[in-house]
Image: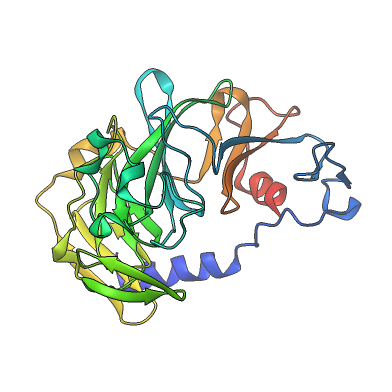
Amino acid sequence: MDRRRFLQCLAIAGSAPKISFAKSSAGDGLGPLRADPAQILDLPHGFRYEIISRAGQLMDDGLRVPGAHDGMAVFSGDAGRWILVCNHELGPTSTDEGAFDQSVGGIPEHFRHRLYDTGGGVTPGLGGTTTTILNPTTGEPERQFLSLAGTEINCAGGATPWGSWLSCEECFETPGLGLSYGRLVRRDRAHGYVFEVPAAAEGLVEPVPITAMGRFEHEAAAVHERTARASSISPKIGTTAFSTDSSPTSRKSCIKAALFKRLRSRASTTLLHTTGREIRIFTRTFRCRPAGSLSKTSITKMMT
């Protein structure tokens, strides 16, 4: 991307309206908010939401859905399924929101060797990712499981063109004893890395830190499709980059990494949204236009 194109992208991003579900008025074309009987989320007429992942729910691997849902990406799977890989921004002291009990003793034996940091068997890392297989027709999850474990403060990340999620630790911690939010924590390994989670993973992945991307508070990551050059950004030190040996160009079609997904076959637009405690799907169906005829102006107006 040259300098002119980069500046054009910045201008477009800066002029884009903010997405908000907090208010609606008759003047914006959406109409007033309608009271939700479940008292979860009020939406205008024609909108609906579905909760697909709630903290504390039992997953298919026998563990609990962790809290602090954060950065995520959607990939295309077999038989038209969606694969949602989601970060959970938890530290070792967030014991009431983790996927397992406070100590390693609460983790099934066959999972323990896949924990990046067991915390001396007392304070394991409680961050990581979950993977959810979704049926886009019904909007229902078909399977959900822990896919990365033993890490900390997995904030944002980035999808790769070859079909994986880069999960970023937004922390910088060294091995040993220390205080975290007023509690004594033991760490066996250093933290502040990026980890890769393939969308096709069927369970916990081997937690291998990508040391070439550096060790610091990683906020997010991105991969340039043509060159396979990956970059990570930190609010404190800026951006770092490294090159991979993969060839994403030949596998470009295997990924659909976007939180904003348009379902052409149903003439609708879907937005995945996280509250930190659960993931919700918002859907708006357009009944006045045939599938595939929605303009960017229509979608922008709907989201404002």
Give the residue furthest to the left. Answer: 245
Name the residue located 33 percent from the left edge and 57 percent from the top edge. 125
Residue 161 lies, in percent from the top left, at: 27, 45
Query: In which quadrant is the C terminus drawn?
Result: bottom right
Q: Nearer the viewer, residue 255 or 156?
A: 156
| Residue 224 can be seen in this image | no
Query: In which quadrant is the N terminus drawn?
Result: bottom left
Name the residue located 31 percent from the left edge and 56 percent from the top edge. 124
The reply, left or right, for residue 211 in relation to residue 52 is: left
With respect to residue 291, does 20 lie above or below? Answer: below
Residue 237 lies, in percent from the top left, at: 31, 82
Q: Nearer the viewer, residue 207 or 57?
A: 57
Q: Nearer the viewer, residue 259 or 234?
A: 234
Name the residue located 81 percent from the left edge and 43 percent from the top edge. 39
The reply, left or right, for residue 30 in relation to residue 146 is: right
With respect to residue 67, does 123 lie above or below? Answer: below
Residue 144 lies, in percent from the top left, at: 43, 31
| Residue 217 can be seen in this image | yes
The reply, left or right, for residue 97 in relation to residue 198 is: right
Residue 291 lies, in percent from the top left, at: 61, 26
The reply, left or right, for residue 278 in relation to residue 36 is: left
> Tag count in the figure?
0
Q: Nearer the viewer, residue 112 or 247?
A: 112
Give the residue furthest to the bottom. Answer: 236
Colour scheme of this structure image?
rainbow
